[in-house]
Image (spheres, rainbow, N blue to C red):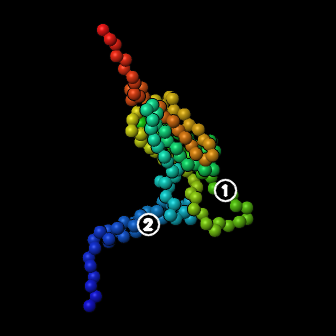
Amino acid sequence: MISLRYRPLFDFQNELHRLQGQMNDVFASGRGSLRGVSPYQFPLLNAWETSDSYYVEAEVPGLALEDLEICMADANTLAIKGQRKQPELAGGQWHRQERAFGLFERSFTLPGAVDADEVDASLKHGVLTIRLPKTPELRPRKIEVKGT
């Protein structure tokens, strides 16, 4: 006698993975064979804060400054936009294509408001580093105690 167990969570996970694969196929069409590469994972980000600023690092290998656009959508939302251009193959053919090409956009919500006029960014060795100073209201300040 064969015993089959009903496992609703396992079946649900399988259905979710199947649906995710179908959605990836739909959104990857028109961009070549990019199966398994999610447009939402580029660029990869690191974020941290100090007492006076937030910092965001993004991995953007192979991109030049003119390929990037950084903007503040509101007081605490950073958007990184750009385009990674596909290299030309002179008489060759692709055997594997895992790096995504084309337009990308990545937004990041910061935990507090930013002084947008003081934001600065640098690109070095394929790593984009953005410093976002906190608004003066969020910065810690020392309060002087006066004696009588």
Quarter holding the C terminus is top left
Q: Tag 2: residue type?
A: Gln
Residue closest to the far bottom: 1
Residue closest to the far front: 147
The residue depicted at 59 percent of the width and 38 percent of the height is 122
Q: Callout 2: few (<14), some (14-19), or many (20+) C-alpha neighbours within 10 Å?
A: few
Specify whether residue 114 is in view. Answer: no
* Residue 17 screen position, x and y as percent: 40, 67
Give the quarter of the image for residue 100: bottom right
* Residue 4 screen position, x and y as percent: 27, 82
* Residue 6 screen position, x and y as percent: 26, 76
In primary-sequence order, the first of circles 1 and 2 is: 2
Q: Callout 1: few (<14), some (14-19), or many (20+) C-alpha neighbours within 10 Å?
A: few
The residue depicted at 41 percent of the width and 42 percent of the height is 109
- Which SS class for mark 2? helix
Give left or right: position of 46 versus 60.
Answer: left
* Residue hosting label 2: 22
Give the quarter of the image for residue 90: bottom right
**Front residue (pair 58, 63):** 58
Residue closest to the far right: 91
* Residue 89 screen position, x and y as percent: 70, 61
The residue depicted at 54 percent of the width and 63 percent of the height is 34
> Where is 129 relative to 136, above or below?
below
Q: Tag 1: residue type?
A: Pro
Spatial separation of the CA atoms under disc 1 and disc 2: 28 Å
* Residue hosting label 1: 87
Numbered label attached to residue 98? none
Give left or right: position of 139 versus 29.
Answer: left
- Which SS class for mark 1? loop
Quarter holding the N terminus is bottom left
Give left or right: position of 13 versus 128.
Answer: left
Residue closest to the far top: 148
